[in-house]
Image (spheres, grey):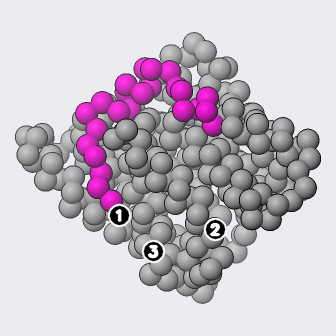
Amino acid sequence: MQRWWPFVLLLLVGASRWAVSAARPDAESTLTSETFGCAWATLLALAFLLPKRQRASLPLKPSRGAMLRWFFSGAMLFGGPAIGILLPGRDLDSSALTIALALTPIIIAIASSALGTESSEGIAGRIWPSLAAVAGLLLVLVQPNLGDPRTDLFLLLAPVLTGLGAVLFCKDPAKDSSRIATALFGACVLFVLALLASRITGAHLTFSLLAIACDGIVALLGIATLSQLGATRWSSQFTWIPLLIILEGIVLVRPKLTAHWFTGLVLLIIAGVYLLLPPGDEAAAGTSSVPTLPV
């Protein structure tokens, strides 16, 4: 159970973020809140994890290649879901982005096979849950408008960046605790660069302490989940969180449920459960000797 608590908390926080934002609109994520959220998450990870390295007598400096890989993996796996915030002047439809991110397990399956972190055997079995989740979301969410090629490209980039970042993060055996802080730092640098670009263009930047706190907590829980459970199980959040939000909406609004709704919910549940049962080789590669990250 110790390995699963970050994932459970991640689902709870992700599924309740909309309610917090509804009560406090300033709790919505912004480029500034993502920047400062990742910054304090990085500092917290350093404060807790580096002493563990020293007590374990691990080398203080991992290889430069590993550091760069963790750095860019963090920028990608956090930048993918936040691509709508990173792009100034382009407001991506939230339903379309939710559906696009449900494709992340497909990218993880293909990238894991290509990079040799998983066997290519049974790759089709690791792809169909993602397709089932997309089908389920299409049945219950507002149909996205795919008429703008540039917007479509950004929606495609979201799962590609997220999945590649997760696979690169899990490529090395989880022996070096500094990879968590390095990945968070990579995400922080990405958001800082985007923030500076927004300032140059004269964009109005807003943030609140509540949004910074929420974004930092999500960042910590997300990277802890990825470290503990591996890429495939981590990616199931893009199925479970929308499912929980939809169920919350059903309880609160009590809409008339149709066959489309029932079919969509069943597909999401099946996909979410299956994504939590990845091949054993990935779980072993992504979770061995993983330090617990206090939040």
Amino acid found under the numbered disc labelled 1: Ala
Q: Give how far across and how far down residue 106 sits, in percent.
A: 64, 33
**Residue at 37% across, 52% down:** 183
Amino acid found under the numbered disc labelled 3: Ile
Task: Count neighbours of disc 1 (C-alpha within 10 A) and say few if under 14, some if 14 to 19, many if 20 or more.
Answer: many
Q: Give how far across and how far down residue 89 sits, in percent.
A: 70, 74
> Seen in the image, is 44 located left or right of residue 54?
right
Circle 2 sits in a helix, a strand or a loop, which is it? helix
Amino acid found under the numbered disc labelled 2: Trp
Residue annotated with mark 1? 41
Residue 58: mark in rendering: none
Q: How far, Cα to Cα, is label 1 from label 2?
A: 21 Å
Sequence-wise, the earlier of marks 1 and 2 is: 2
Sequence-wise, the earlier of marks 1 and 3 is: 1
Tell me: residue 211, above or below residue 17: below
Task: Count neighbours of disc 2 (C-alpha within 10 A) and say few if under 14, some if 14 to 19, many if 20 or more.
Answer: some
Q: How far, Cα to Cα, is label 2 from label 3?
A: 15 Å
Q: In this picture, which residue range is highlighted in magenta?
A: 272-295
